[in-house]
């Protein structure tokens, strides 16, 4: 293998030094140098410009070179630029391949009109002289072939897991972990110290919960106050924080905090469905080729488990009777029984039906969050766009 081929192979495997060397070779004639780091699926590039920067051309050259590299570890790119000759604060975030097809050749140009546009060219960033703000296309994202393959493989693996007894028992531990963490995190958020643990006597899990602590609540409100202080120059963020604080206080002063703490065992399972499928679709936090399929498998396994659990509570009289008897012959009531009898005074099937809808909605929400990711990310950025 030639030295050049070895360098490209190292870069494809995610070696930051090799990627940096390739980009510096491409940008040598522009008198630009880079320093790169790879974090999850994000490639961060610090771009240093010796002369008056031609950032649009640099953006195209960088994206084109990385697209040729075709590394499975790089999905999104963030570039931050600085210059010797001018005060420059410029950054750009984009998906790999967004600018690679703009122009037929990597011509060195300064006149924007001399770049031959592709049939549907993406928005190029404004020059730093006009505005430091970045412009990003808000068009919906499409799931890549890698994402689709991962979802299909994960779906098929989950069907196997849910139907093979010993495999289901093994992966049931994932559901127990997620379930008890959901209880524990929510209890802590409302001032009650809690410890998730394994139920050695009866199987499954149990969360040990203590009384509400004034110290924990004081620390939570101190943290909220600190967020208000850090956001004091951003009126939109202050508005969101104010709404959140009022809602949090309302929950704290009413039975809503206990309802949420009890429900969030199963509620966290529904969230895990969405998170796992979102990571499988997007490729975020995936360092190896099989990571996406594993996320999809866990998401669909939790999805099928949730559907089966809620459907049996609604339709299977024997299963429902066993669930209503509780854990350890009635020593501990199950979550949905507590919600149905002590808080909402409804039939158990009503709570089970609500959870069923949560499970059904989770994959759709994951897909929509990815497809319209640019919209909600832009919305978050807009919260910080207005500064006093």
Image (cartoon, rainbow, N blue to C red):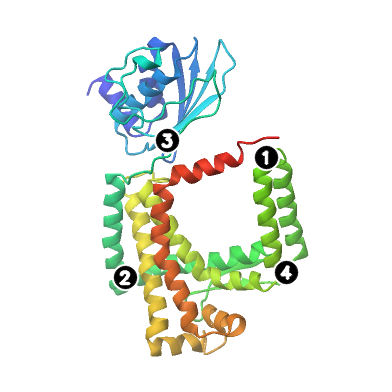
Residue under label 1: 234
Nearer the viewer's eye, disc 4 or disc 1? 1
In this rendered view, identify the residue nearer to me: 375 or 259.
375
N-terminal-most mark, 3 or 2: 3
Q: Position of residue 66 (x, y in %)?
A: 34, 28
Kindly state the secondary structure of the residue where label 3 is placed: loop
Q: Is residue 97 left or right of residue 346?
A: left
Which numbered circle lies on residue 250? none
Cα gap from disc 3 to disc 1, whole angstroms: 24 Å
Q: Are marks 3 and 2 in contact (CB under 8 Å)?
A: no
Kindly state the secondary structure of the residue where label 4 is placed: helix
Cα gap from disc 1 to disc 2, whole angstroms: 48 Å
Quarter assignment of residue 366: bottom left
Residue under label 3: 137
Residue under label 2: 162
N-terminal-most mark, 1 or 2: 2
Q: Residue at x 39, y 40 (%)?
A: 139
Cα gap from disc 4 to disc 2, whole angstroms: 41 Å
Quarter assignment of residue 361: bottom left
Farthest-out residue, left:
1
Tell me if I can see residue 40 in this picture: yes
Nearer the viewer's eye, disc 4 or disc 2? 4
Q: Residue at x 39, y 60 (%)?
A: 363
> Is 125 above or below relative to 349?
above
Q: Are marks 3 and 4 in contact (CB under 8 Å)?
A: no
Which numbered circle lies on residue 253? 4
Nearer the viewer's eye, disc 3 or disc 2? 3
N-terminal-most mark, 4 or 2: 2
Kindly state the secondary structure of the residue where label 1 is placed: loop
């Amino acid at each position: 293998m030639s030295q050049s081929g070895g360098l490209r192979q190292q870069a494809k495997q995610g070696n930051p030094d090799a990627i940096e060397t390739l980009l510096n070779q491409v940008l040598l004639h522009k008198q630009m140098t880079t320093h790169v780091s790879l974090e999850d699926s994000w490639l961060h590039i610090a771009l240093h410009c010796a002369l008056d920067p031609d950032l649009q051309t640099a953006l195209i050259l960088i994206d084109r070179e990385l697209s040729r590299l075709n590394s499975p570890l790089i999905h999104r790119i963030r570039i931050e630029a600085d210059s010797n000759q001018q005060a420059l604060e410029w950054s750009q975030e984009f998906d790999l391949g967004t600018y690679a097809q703009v122009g037929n050749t990597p011509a060195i140009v300064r006149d924007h009109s001399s770049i031959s546009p592709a049939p549907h060219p993406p928005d190029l960033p404004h020059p730093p002289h006009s505005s430091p703000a970045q412009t990003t296309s808000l068009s919906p994202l499409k799931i890549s072939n890698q994402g689709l393959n991962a979802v299909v493989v994960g779906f098929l693996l989950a069907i196997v897991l849910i139907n093979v007894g010993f495999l289901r028992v093994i992966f049931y531990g994932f559901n127990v972990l997620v379930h008890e963490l959901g209880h524990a995190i929510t209890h802590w958020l409302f001032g009650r110290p809690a410890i998730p643990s394994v139920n050695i006597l009866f199987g499954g899990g149990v969360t040990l919960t203590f009384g509400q602590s004034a110290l924990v609540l004081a620390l939570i409100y101190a943290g909220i106050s600190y967020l208000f202080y850090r956001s004091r120059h951003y009126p939109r963020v202050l508005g969101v924080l104010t709404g959140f604080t009022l809602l949090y206080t309302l929950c704290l002063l009413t039975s809503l905090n206990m309802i949420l703490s009890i429900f969030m065992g199963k509620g966290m399972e529904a969230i895990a469905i969405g998170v796992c499928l979102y990571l499988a679709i997007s490729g975020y936090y995936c360092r190896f080729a099989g990571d996406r399929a594993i996320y999809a498998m866990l998401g669909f396994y939790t999805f099928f488990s949730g559907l089966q659990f809620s459907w049996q509570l609604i339709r299977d009289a024997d299963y429902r009777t066993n669930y209503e008897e509780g854990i350890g012959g009635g020593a501990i009531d199950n979550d949905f029984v507590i919600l149905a009898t002590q808080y909402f005074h409804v039939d158990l099937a009503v709570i089970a039906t609500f959870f069923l809808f949560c499970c059904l909605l989770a994959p759709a929400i994951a897909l929509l969050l990815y497809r319209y990711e640019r919209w909600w990310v832009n919305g978050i950025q807009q919260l910080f766009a207005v500064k006093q």
